[in-house]
Image (cartoon, rainbow, N blue to C red):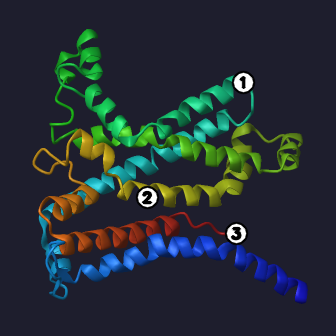
């Protein structure tokens, strides 16, 4: 009993510094932001308590709902883009040959590049006159398909989703490769001896044993997508006419462009609420019976 208590005490002492830092830099600011959402505050004058007025205004603002719809597009594109692509690549690159290590490094490389640089690169790729996409379409005789990708409201949200998906495949690839390497080789050997095909091994062994990792990846994907800001802000700034407005750009514009710090705090709190709701829905949808 004493040895168990000593181990628990050692674990608590080890975790406590990280927990304190996390609370100081993450948990406390979240509640502090929610608190300032109850005030009318420009960042310079004294805050004036106005109750739920900021939150009510957020819910009534059509731009907020447009930003939420755009963020849902980013979330769906990320979950059904980053996670499946990363999982497929992990299954193909799970071994440690020289070629596979090179490909893994190449896939992870966009994560190392600054998100601002990524936004600038893709802004040039989508440029209506100088962009690579329109140049290729023109070269192959598909002039009718060319368009101002970031200015056309019918496609610009899908266009800005592509760089976000491309930018963050690498981390999930590393996570999935680590999960694959933790699957005991004896299980796969037994399945091979029993005559299981590659599809059956994938469906009945690999995916079930990775399922918790996949659920964690989906949570990270949703949370990261709802915080998407840099690439979209650099490429479009939320325009034209708020057609690519996201929750983060909406919060930024209200907070730092027109100095409504109280309203911006209310918006940031709503982002957290939306994130928790979507994460809860995803975890319920991915729940498996033992």
Q: Residues under labels 2 and 3: Cα distance?
A: 25 Å
Residue under the image location 82 percent in, 86 percent down: 5
| Residue identifier under label 1 | 98
Q: Quadrant of residue 18?
A: bottom right
Residue under the image location 17 percent in, 82 percent down: 47
Q: Which mark is residue 222?
A: 2
Give percent across and percent down for residue 192.
Answer: 85, 40
Neighbourhood count class around disc 2 (C-alpha, 10 Å): few under 14, some 14–19, many 20 upward: many
Q: Quadrant of residue 104?
A: top right
Name the N-terminal-most of marks 2 and 1. Answer: 1
Residue under the image location 35 percent in, 52 percent down: 228
**Circle 3 sits in a helix, a strand or a loop, which is it?**
loop
Which of label 2 and label 1 is nearer to you? 1
Viewer-proximal residue, 90 or 3?
3
Give percent across and percent down for residue 227.
Answer: 36, 57
Which of label 2 and label 3 is nearer to you? 2
| Residue identifier under label 3 | 290
Neighbourhood count class around disc 3 (C-alpha, 10 Å): few under 14, some 14–19, many 20 upward: few
**Circle 1 sits in a helix, a strand or a loop, which is it?**
helix
């Amino acid at each position: 009993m004493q040895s168990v208590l000593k181990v628990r005490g050692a674990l608590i002492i080890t975790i406590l510094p990280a927990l304190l830092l996390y609370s100081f830099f993450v948990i406390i600011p979240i509640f502090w932001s929610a608190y300032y959402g109850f005030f009318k505050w420009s960042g310079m004058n004294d805050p004036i308590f106005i109750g739920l007025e900021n939150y009510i205004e957020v819910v009534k603002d059509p731009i907020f709902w447009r930003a939420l719809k755009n963020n849902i597009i980013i979330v769906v594109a990320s979950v059904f883009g980053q996670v499946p692509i990363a999982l497929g690549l992990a299954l193909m690159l799970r071994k440690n040959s020289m070629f596979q290590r090179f490909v893994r490094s190449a896939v992870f490389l966009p994560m190392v590049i600054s998100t601002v640089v990524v936004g600038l690169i893709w802004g040039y790729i989508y440029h209506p006159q100088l962009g690579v996409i329109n140049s290729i379409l023109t070269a192959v005789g598909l002039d009718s398909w060319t368009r101002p990708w970031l200015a056309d409201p019918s496609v610009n949200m899908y266009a800005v989703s592509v760089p976000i998906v491309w930018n963050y495949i690498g981390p999930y690839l590393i996570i999935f490769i680590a999960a694959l390497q933790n699957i005991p080789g004896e299980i796969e050997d037994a399945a091979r001896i029993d005559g299981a095909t590659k599809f059956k091994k994938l469906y009945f062994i690999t995916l079930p044993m990775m399922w918790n990792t996949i659920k964690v990846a989906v949570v990270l994907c949703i949370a990261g997508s709802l915080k998407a800001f840099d690439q979209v802000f650099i490429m479009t700034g939320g325009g034209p006419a708020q057609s690519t407005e996201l929750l983060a750009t909406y919060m930024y514009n209200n907070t730092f462009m027109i100095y409504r710090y109280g309203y911006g705090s209310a918006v940031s709190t709503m982002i957290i609420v939306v994130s928790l709701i979507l994460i809860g829905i995803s975890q319920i949808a991915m729940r498996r019976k033992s």
